[in-house]
Image (cartoon, rainbow, N blue to C red):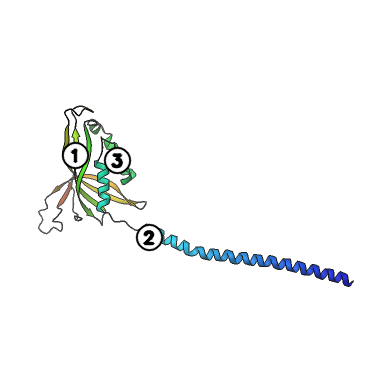
């Protein structure tokens, strides 16, 4: 009888040790998981902070505008530079520009006006409204016959003035509107923009802006 009791006692002890070991493992796992969750919280907060910071409004700069102008005004022939200026435009602006290039009046000169080269630009920026006025100088070559440079007029100087309106998309400033405009002298004595004057668009509207130095 005593031997039977001793066997039962041993079994109870073994079962107790097993149960205790399992409990210790479960407790240890729970503490470890809790520690991981605690450690991951600062990272989550940091990621949220980083995301918020990256979405802050960007400021339009001379360099951004010039990079676009170089890509836009440097080309071998009409539409040859689409892949280069595309990254600086919104999809809507890009589609509008390519549609304009495909118009018959522009296609008629394709192959006759070639070798466009950007030279320089005077850039005026309205940082508040993300608008840039650019007075661009560039050269090109005029051919009497396609692909025939025998009587070509080379390095013909040209000048163009654009008003570029930018929008922020996917953390980038992109050209969303492009207008050809005419700069005229500002005769208003109380004008705040003596270095710039007035920009008159093709439809007769006017706008003012500071010149970024």
Q: Residue at x 32, y 43 (%)?
A: 86
On the image, the x and y values in percent for residue 32 come to 58, 65
Q: Residues within 10 Å of mark 3 (few under 14, many from 20)?
A: some
Q: Secondary structure at mark 2?
A: helix
Q: Quadrant of residue 57?
A: bottom left
Q: Earlier in the sequence, mark 3 or mark 1?
A: 3
Q: Earlier in the sequence, mark 3 or mark 2?
A: 2
**How far apart are the two marked residues, 3 and 1, measured between alpha carbons?**
24 Å
On the image, the x and y values in percent for residue 176 come to 29, 47
| Cβ atoms under marks 2 and 1 closer than 8 Å | no
Query: In what quadrant of the picture does the C terminus appear?
Result: bottom left
Q: Quadrant of residue 69?
A: top left
The residue tagged 1 is 139
Q: Residues within 10 Å of mark 1 (few under 14, many from 20)?
A: some
Residue 53 disc label: 2
Q: Earlier in the sequence, mark 2 or mark 1?
A: 2
Q: Secondary structure at mark 3?
A: helix
Q: Secondary structure at mark 1?
A: strand
Q: Residue at x 51, y 63 (%)?
A: 40
Question: Marks 2 and 1: which is nearer the front?
Answer: 1
Q: Residue at x 44, y 60 (%)?
A: 47
On the image, the x and y values in percent for residue 134 come to 20, 48
**How far apart are the two marked residues, 3 and 2, measured between alpha carbons?**
33 Å
The residue tagged 3 is 96
Question: Marks 3 and 2: which is nearer the front?
Answer: 2
On the image, the x and y values in percent for residue 157 come to 16, 39
């Amino acid at each position: 009888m005593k031997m039977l009791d001793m066997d039962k006692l041993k079994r109870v002890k073994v079962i107790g040790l097993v149960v205790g070991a399992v409990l210790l493992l479960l407790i240890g796992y729970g503490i470890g998981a809790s520690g991981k969750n605690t450690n991951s919280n600062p990272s989550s907060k940091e990621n949220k902070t980083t995301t918020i910071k990256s979405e802050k409004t960007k400021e339009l700069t001379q360099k951004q505008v010039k990079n676009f102008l170089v890509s836009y005004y440097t080309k071998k022939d009409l539409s040859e530079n689409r892949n280069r200026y595309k990254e600086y435009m919104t999809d809507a602006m890009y589609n509008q520009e390519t549609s304009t290039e495909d118009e018959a009046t522009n296609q008629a000169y394709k192959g006759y006006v070639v070798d466009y080269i950007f030279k320089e630009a005077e850039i005026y920026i309205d940082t508040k409204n993300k608008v840039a006025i650019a007075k661009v100088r560039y050269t090109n070559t005029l051919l009497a016959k396609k692909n025939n440079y025998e009587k070509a007029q080379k390095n013909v100087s040209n000048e163009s003035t654009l008003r570029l309106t930018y929008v922020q998309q996917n953390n980038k400033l992109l050209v969303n509107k492009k207008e050809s405009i005419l700069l005229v002298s500002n005769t208003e004595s109380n004008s705040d923009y003596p270095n710039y004057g007035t920009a008159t668009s093709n439809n007769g509207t006017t706008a003012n802006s500071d010149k970024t130095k």
